[in-house]
Amino acid sequence: MELLREKYVWVCFLLLSFAATSSVTTRQTRTHCKTTCGNLTLEFPFGTSPRCVPDERFLVICKEREGKAFLNTTKQEVLSISSDGELQVLVDILRVCKNNTGGVDEGRETDRIEDAGFTFSDKNQVTLVGCNVDASWDYFTGVGDSSDSCVTHCSSSQPIHDDSCSGNGCCKYPVTSGGAYGLWVETTGFFNPCIYAFIVKAGYFFFSGEQDLENLRNVTRFPVILDWTMEGTCQTSSCGLNTYCTNHTSRRGPSYSCKCLKGFEGNPYFPYGCNGIPSFT
């Protein structure tokens, strides 16, 4: 059996370090701060101008002709932004393939992302597609690191079924929020053309059996949900009126998030961003 050399790829999203001030919030409300890019709505603290963001890692590059937005730090395409603390981006997959001589081509790897200013949400899954493959990952929080793995097997006596990702050609595992991941794959004698490992938002990917084992339907990126928080604590927060604040702990230190109280909606980081929801009786 040919032993595929270990493929090691780090995928790290670390909490952003910055202090949000009231002057930044004021700048965001000015008319010169762009609030859309194509179909994307830009929620504070994100913006397209350095004058409208508290830190460059919240800076979004808007390509007007394409109608697409990209994070300035990682160049990843942004799909959605929420003032509730979520950001959705497209992340490249890890792919390892055989070549015509029976060797191994490195292929396309998952982006190496360091100090990007965000953490993985628990609304994602680590997914592995391939035969006789072991995908492992380390999870780092700085307060309690851990490791997990996901293993697939294929057999001629056991047919591959669509929408089944429980070990026969495909496996998945829930993501733990709040840290950074180191992800790698290794295998002995895989017989499908390629193996694929990726993080994807839960419920998005449905295994298509033989077709995915062949080429993953030529998909090279998947949507991933990231969490973002503000540096500091609730005692020093810049939450607006009609909000509540939650403290968080990560490998980068303390941070906090603001949310509107029940019955209110809007951007909780504006001084008067959370407004009452009209009731119709």
Image (cartoon, rainbow, N blue to C red):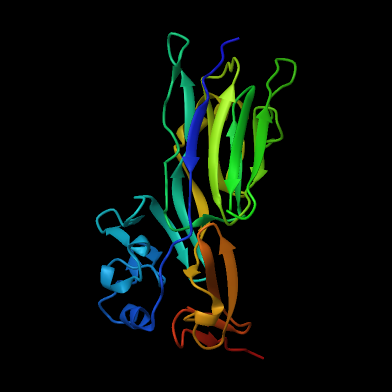
Hey, which quadrant is residue 72 in on the image? bottom left
Outermost residue to the bottom: 281
Outermost residue to the right: 157
From the viewer's perspective, is residue 211 above or below residue 250? above
Q: Residue 265 location in percent, x, y?
A: 54, 81
Name the quadrant of the N terminus.
top right
From the viewer's perspective, is residue 2 above or below residue 28? above
Q: Residue 113 location in percent, x, y?
A: 42, 46
From the viewer's perspective, is residue 144 above or below residue 242? above
In the image: residue 220, left or right of residue 253: left
- Residue at figure coordinates x 45%, y 87% from the top left: 271
Q: Can the viewer see residue 162? A: no
- Residue at figure coordinates x 27%, y 80% from the top left: 31
Q: Can the viewer see residue 14? A: yes
Hey, which quadrant is residue 56 in on the image? bottom left
Q: Residue 41 location in percent, x, y?
A: 40, 68
Q: Residue 279 location in percent, x, y?
A: 62, 89
- Residue at figure coordinates x 54%, y 81% from the top left: 235
Judge by depth and name the residue closer to the eye, 5 or 65: 5
Judge by depth and name the residue closer to the eye, 89 or 156: 89
Name the quadrant of the C terminus.
bottom right
